[in-house]
């Protein structure tokens, strides 16, 4: 069951704008040890939530790297997501109305500072492991740079030190689809949902890639006549509708902008200089077929974080491999934690 922390103080954003107050939704699993030395903090991916057991299969289980019998696991819904934390669907206390399109742009650093507010509230000053994949990894590396003594160990999975133009291009195409929705701009919770469904179908291509589609979406029967209805078509439609039913287009829009804002070198000289600030013992994991955050894009993490351990998971599932290949990932992380 998610919990909610209300922070009744102004929260300054990197843009210079200000949120009058914060609500932060979070989940915990397991029991905090008396010495508070068994904390694992998970930073979630784009459309996930604070319930790690819900979106990361076979991780919050006995014998797994998020074993609730051994660790106290914390995951906070990040800023801008409508799953409980302050977002475009939250009430602006200054107007008494929902933020909607007036919700300010946020950055990954803003998300991390929001996590830090919660950590302070929970009395957590140090964690055994800080772990995240994709934009979750963005948050983790930012946190490890902003507060080098916070994490004993750091796991960065399918993630990169900055958003490359390739990833930003996918995100802008998604936002274009949302803006073309005739309901976009209307003051309603369900504005832009049809456009967001199209956006999700665009995103999924980048998450999976050709190998995954060709392996999983082949036609089930061989037909001699021309086929105008393909299995891949219904898959795209299904995935778009699936997100349409559970997410919000205004949050999706702002979060995709936050992804594009990611650059750990901003204000820190260079990527190399920023990564060299990380003190935590670090694990870096790339997915062999990831076309969004390629294996090569992980090289700066391997090169500039002192002593970083680097693994490549062989998978046909592209960027989504971090969700699908849970057995391989579990073996790597458990071994990392054991040393």
Image (spheres, helix red, strand yellow):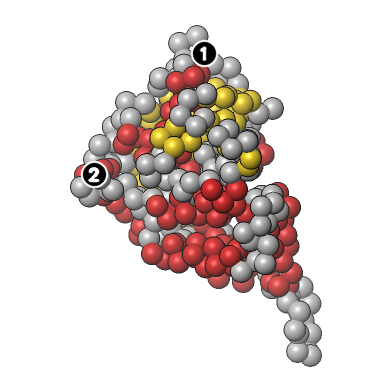
Which residue occupies the foreground of this view, 198 or 192? 192
Give how far apart the Cα atoms at labels 2 and 1 are: 36 Å
In the image: residue 159, left or right of residue 217: left
Residue 37, placed above or below residue 254: above
Dot 1: element:
loop
In the image, residue 48 lies at what x, y percent? Answer: 60, 44
In the image, residue 21 lies at what x, y percent? Answer: 52, 30
Q: Residue furthest front?
A: 95
In the image: residue 297, left or right of residue 183: left
For disc 1, the marked residue is 33
User: What residue appears at the point 75 percent right and 89 percent down from the top-left corner?
Assistant: 226
For disc 2, the marked residue is 268
**Few, some or many C-alpha atoms within 10 Å of disc 1 (few <14, some 14-19, many ≥20)?**
few
User: What residue appears at the point 55 percent right and 55 percent down from the top-left corner?
Assistant: 253
Q: Quadrant of the C terminus?
A: top left
Dot 2: element:
loop
Residue 29, placed above or below residue 201: above
């Amino acid at each position: 069951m998610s919990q909610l922390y209300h922070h009744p103080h102004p929260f300054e954003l990197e843009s210079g704008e200000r949120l009058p107050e914060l609500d932060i939704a979070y989940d915990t699993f397991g029991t905090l040890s008396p010495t508070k030395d068994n904390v694992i903090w998970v930073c979630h991916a784009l459309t996930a939530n604070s319930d790690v057991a819900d979106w990361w299969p076979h991780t919050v289980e006995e014998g797994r790297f998020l074993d609730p019998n051994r660790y106290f696991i914390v995951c906070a819904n990040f800023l801008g997501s409508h799953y409980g934390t302050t977002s475009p669907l939250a009430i602006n206390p200054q107007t008494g109305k929902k933020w909607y399109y007036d919700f300010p742009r946020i950055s990954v650093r803003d998300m991390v500072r929001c996590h830090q507010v919660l950590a302070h509230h929970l009395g957590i000053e140090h964690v055994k492991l800080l772990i995240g994949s994709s934009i979750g990894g963005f948050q983790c590396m930012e946190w490890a740079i902003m507060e080098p003594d916070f994490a004993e160990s750091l796991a960065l999975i399918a993630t990169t030190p900055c958003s490359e133009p390739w990833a930003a291009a996918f995100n802008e195409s998604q936002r274009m689809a949302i803006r073309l929705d005739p309901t976009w701009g209307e003051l309603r919770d369900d504005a832009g949902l049809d456009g967001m469904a199209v956006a999700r179908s665009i995103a999924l291509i980048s998450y999976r890639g050709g190998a995954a589609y060709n392996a999983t979406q082949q036609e089930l029967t061989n037909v001699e006549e021309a086929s105008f209805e393909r299995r891949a078509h219904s898959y795209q439609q299904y995935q778009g509708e699936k997100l349409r039913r559970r997410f919000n287009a205004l949050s999706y829009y702002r979060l995709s902008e936050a992804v594009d804002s990611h650059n750990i070198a901003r204000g820190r000289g260079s990527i190399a200089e920023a990564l060299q600030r990380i003190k935590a013992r670090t694990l870096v994991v790339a997915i062999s077929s990831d076309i969004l955050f390629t294996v090569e894009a992980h090289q700066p993490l391997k090169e500039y974080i002192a002593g970083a351990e680097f693994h490549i998971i062989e998978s046909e599932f592209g960027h989504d491999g971090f969700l699908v290949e849970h057995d391989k990932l579990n073996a790597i992380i458990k071994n990392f934690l054991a040393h």
